[in-house]
């Protein structure tokens, strides 16, 4: 019973905050909206923690055989609020599923969410629409919680659309700049393509299963034919591609950096973009039976991560670098999913949420310090001025680079090991991605904080309300690896076992390498990472190499810097034909068919009216006469016919 | 009462019909061709009463009181109609200072 109330409260708090902040946006002055929103997420986080503790305790008691009311199926607790859709054979309850997976995601969403809300109080302090901002941020959290807590695909889909909407609203938050609106629209349209796949997948799934509840679908996953399950999982994966920004739909994410930096941190790094990974882990029982889909996921993830990591090397916008890094890391997670290493993917989701949120917030702090400057060529030497930001950013960079001891090391290592077990070449490819990551992240770090200051603004450290979340996230980025220490160094893979109670894919994982192989691979990885850092140090600290604008680079580099011309390719492939069709529909369909039809109808009515007007002569005798004639005619007609 | 009925039945039915038709036609002609509104109203009454006459005659010839009920009904409606008609007439006289029906042509299209 307590669980039910708590589980309802978790999404209820942000929803309440969103409604209050939106309806009182004119009267909430100063930081009021920010404090309200942060408080709501904080309360939501507290409820999640209590739920988590409760769940842990029940699980432990269950394992010890002491708990009488054992929740069914490995600690899965369904909180049904009411019957929602009940049509024919379709029965969709409005219900939450509380299990290890949703709890993990809830903790990430509300925990990191509350830190980012807190940070936003400082970051958005001077904005005139600050209450709107916080209401949208709260609404996003609500939608994201629906997504991860839903007990059926429909609930998840509602949350899925909700986060898409909030992402659109928040990318275009500064709507007075047209480019930002274009970015928002691009994100929305590209997400819709993915959503279409998702919906089709759901429809197919429903037609063969007759239900969309996770527990029932997963229990009967094995009963489907391979073709059906491959089709369904491919469609679901299309949805994941859109939301998690993978090839070919990833180009919206870098553009989404138009939004305020906390938005990038919350939505486009830590939470929303991991929804695709969540969806696949949630449906892992389906994906396990679809080896073809898994291969597709693997290749899409691998190519995406390689492509975008290479693009990241040539970006000069501090947020764009992080954006490409995010896409690349998401690609790595998909590689893990493709390999069936669901726990590694979820582990990386968690640690990535820590350090990427940290990096984005750090970038926001830098931008704040420089009064809106985002070009790293106009930064440098900030190490001495913004000390807290520097130290935390450094920690974040070390974590994403995978320096041993930091959280990123463990999660990335888990993926690399899974890749090696599949094929050494795959290991090499993922290692390449990691090394590129190291290079561009240290390029970013060195160009921003080292050397001498190259800009004109007067840098200053951000207020405590912004640096406090940085410090908390920095601590999490360091110790986050402890969540899932590998057996190799004496850990118990806690997270894997915990998540294994919720996702069949995780409990069915069988990744095992010889201890010596693991040590060697780890050694190679670390050695190359250190080499890469040295390379970056040599290039960007000793000499401070600044890349010119993209058009002045040599051919190959220019190709990469211009995003492998993907935007141009899409423009040629889709936008041009679309524009061509639109133009022709306009010139033929609209002007030659629709307009004459409409105008013709109107002018005919006019002409008939003009003719009929003459009847209204105003001559009373005539009216009387015509009335009599009419009556006689009617009478005659009646007599004749009856 | 029976005397009246017998008296009416003494005249052949055809005569009533012809008389009614003549009266009705005179009324209709007046409505159509006169311009004085008072005359038009009077002609309307003539038409009503020609019909009334016919109904009474039929009623008597068929020994069916239903026809007389109709007559009373028509007289009632005619009374109401005349009230409205005369009111219009008075207003017309006040507004355009004429009873010529063709003066009312301001709504000409």
Image: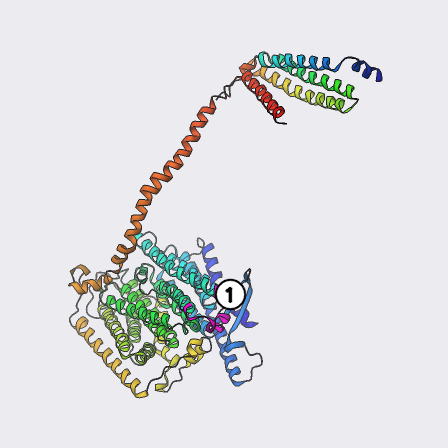
User: What is the quadrant of residue A455 in the picture?
Assistant: bottom left
Observer-nearest residue: A374 or A88? A88
Residue labelled with disc 1: A210
Total marks shown come to 1
- Above-or-below relation of A597 to A370: above
**Magenta stretch contains residue A489:** no
Q: Residue at x 70, y 12 (%)?
A: B19
User: Residue A245: in sight, yes or no?
Assistant: yes
State the quadrant of the C terminus of chain A.
top right
Query: Percent x, y for residue B40?
Result: 62, 14
Image quarter of the N terminus of chain A: bottom right
The extreme right residue here reads: B2
| Residue stretch rendered in magenta on the structure | A207-227
Assess whether residue A218 is covered by the magenta stretch. Answer: yes
- Percent across and percent down for residue A73 are 51, 77
Viewer-nearest residue: A637 or A467: A637
Is the residue marked by circle 1 packed among few (<14), some (14-19), or many (20+) residues within 10 Å? Answer: some
Image coords of residue A141 (percent x, y): 43, 64
> Is A361 displayed left or right of B4 in the figure?
left
Q: Secondary structure at mark 1?
A: loop
| Rendered image quadrant of residue B16 | top right
- Residue at x 45% of width, y 54% of height: A27
Residue under the point 46% across and 63% down? A14
- Residue drawn at x 69%, y 18% as measured from the top left: B51
Disc 1 is attached to a residue of which chain?
Answer: A
Q: How is the image coloured?
A: rainbow
């Amino acid at each position: 019973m307590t669980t039910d109330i708590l589980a309802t409260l978790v999404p209820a708090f942000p929803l309440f905050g969103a409604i209050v902040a939106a309806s009182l946006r004119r009267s909430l002055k100063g930081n009021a909206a920010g404090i309200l929103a942060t408080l709501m997420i904080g309360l939501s986080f507290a409820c999640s923690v209590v739920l988590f503790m409760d769940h842990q305790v029940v699980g432990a008691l269950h394992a010890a055989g002491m708990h009488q009311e054992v929740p069914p199926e490995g600690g899965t607790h369904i909180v049904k609020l009411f019957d929602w859709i009940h049509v024919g054979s379709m029965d969709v309850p409005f219900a939450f599923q509380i299990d290890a997976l949703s709890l993990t995601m809830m903790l990430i969403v509300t925990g990191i969410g509350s830190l980012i809300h807190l940070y936003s109080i400082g970051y958005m302090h001077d904005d005139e629409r600050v209450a709107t901002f916080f209401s949208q941020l709260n609404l996003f959290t609500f939608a994201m919680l629906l997504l991860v807590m839903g007990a059926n695909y429909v609930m998840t889909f509602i949350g899925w659309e909700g986060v898409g909407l909030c992402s659109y609203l928040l990318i275009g938050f500064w709507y007075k700049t047209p480019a930002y609106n274009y970015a928002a629209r691009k994100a929305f349209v590209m997400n819709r393509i993915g959503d279409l796949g998702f919906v089709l997948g759901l429809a197919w799934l429903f037609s063969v299963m007759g239900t969309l509840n996770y527990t029932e679908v997963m229990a009967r996953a094995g009963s489907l034919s391979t073709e059906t399950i491959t089709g369904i999982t491919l469609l679901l994966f299309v949805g994941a591609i859109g939301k998690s920004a993978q090839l070919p739909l990833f180009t919206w994410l870098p553009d989404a950096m138009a939004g305020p930096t906390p938005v990038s941190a919350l939505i486009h790094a830590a939470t929303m973009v991991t929804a695709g990974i969540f969806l696949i882990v949630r449906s892992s029982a389906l994906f396990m039976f679809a080896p073809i889909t898994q291969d597709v996921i693997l290749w899409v993830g691998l190519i995406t991560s390689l492509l975008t990591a290479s693009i990241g090397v040539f970006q000069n916008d501090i947020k764009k670098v992080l954006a490409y890094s995010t896409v690349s890391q998401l690609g790595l997670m998909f590689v893990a999913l493709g390999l069936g290493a669901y726990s590694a993917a979820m582990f990386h989701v968690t640690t990535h949420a820590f350090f990427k949120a940290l990096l984005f917030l750090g970038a926001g702090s830098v931008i704040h310090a420089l009064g809106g400057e985002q070009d790293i060529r106009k930064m440098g030497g900030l190490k001495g001025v913004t000390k807290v930001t520097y130290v935390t950013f450094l920690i974040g960079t070390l974590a994403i680079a995978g320096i041993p001891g930091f959280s990123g090391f463990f999660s990335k290592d888990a993926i690399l090991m899974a890749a090696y077990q599949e094929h050494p070449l795959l290991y090499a490819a993922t290692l390449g991605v990691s090394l590129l990551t190291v290079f561009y992240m240290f390029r970013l770090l060195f160009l921003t904080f080292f050397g001498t200051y190259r800009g004109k603004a007067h840098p200053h450290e951000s207020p405590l309300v912004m640096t406090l979340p940085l410090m908390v996230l920095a601590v999490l980025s360091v110790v986050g690896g402890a969540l899932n220490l590998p057996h190799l160094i004496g850990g118990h893979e806690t997270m894997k076992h915990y998540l294994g109670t919720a996702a069949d894919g995780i409990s069915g994982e069988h990744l095992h390498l010889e201890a010596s192989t693991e040590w060697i691979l780890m050694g190679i990885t670390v050695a190359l990472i250190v080499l890469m850092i040295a390379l970056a140090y040599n290039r960007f600290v000793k000499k401070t190499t600044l890349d010119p604008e993209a058009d002045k680079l040599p051919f190959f580099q220019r190709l990469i810097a211009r995003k492998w011309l993907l935007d141009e390719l899409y423009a040629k492939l889709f936008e041009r034909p679309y524009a061509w069709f639109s133009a022709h529909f306009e010139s033929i369909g609209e002007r030659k068919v629709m307009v004459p039809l409409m105008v013709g109808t109107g002018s005919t009515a006019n002409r008939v009216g003009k003719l009929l007007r003459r009847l209204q002569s105003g001559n009373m005798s005539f009216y009387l006469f015509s009335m009599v004639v009419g009556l006689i005619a009617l009478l005659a007609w009646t007599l004749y016919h009856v | 009462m029976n005397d009246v009925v017998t008296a009416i039945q003494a005249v052949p039915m055809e005569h009533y019909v012809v008389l009614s038709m003549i009266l009705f036609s005179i009324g209709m002609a007046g409505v159509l061709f006169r311009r004085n509104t008072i005359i038009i109203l009077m002609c309307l009454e003539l038409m009503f009463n020609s019909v009334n006459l016919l109904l009474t005659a039929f009623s008597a010839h068929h020994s069916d009181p239903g026809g007389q009920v109709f007559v009373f009904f028509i007289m009632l409606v005619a009374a109401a109609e005349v009230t409205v008609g005369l009111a219009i007439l008075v207003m017309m006289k006040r507004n355009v200072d004429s009873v010529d029906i063709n003066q009312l042509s301001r709504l000409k299209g």
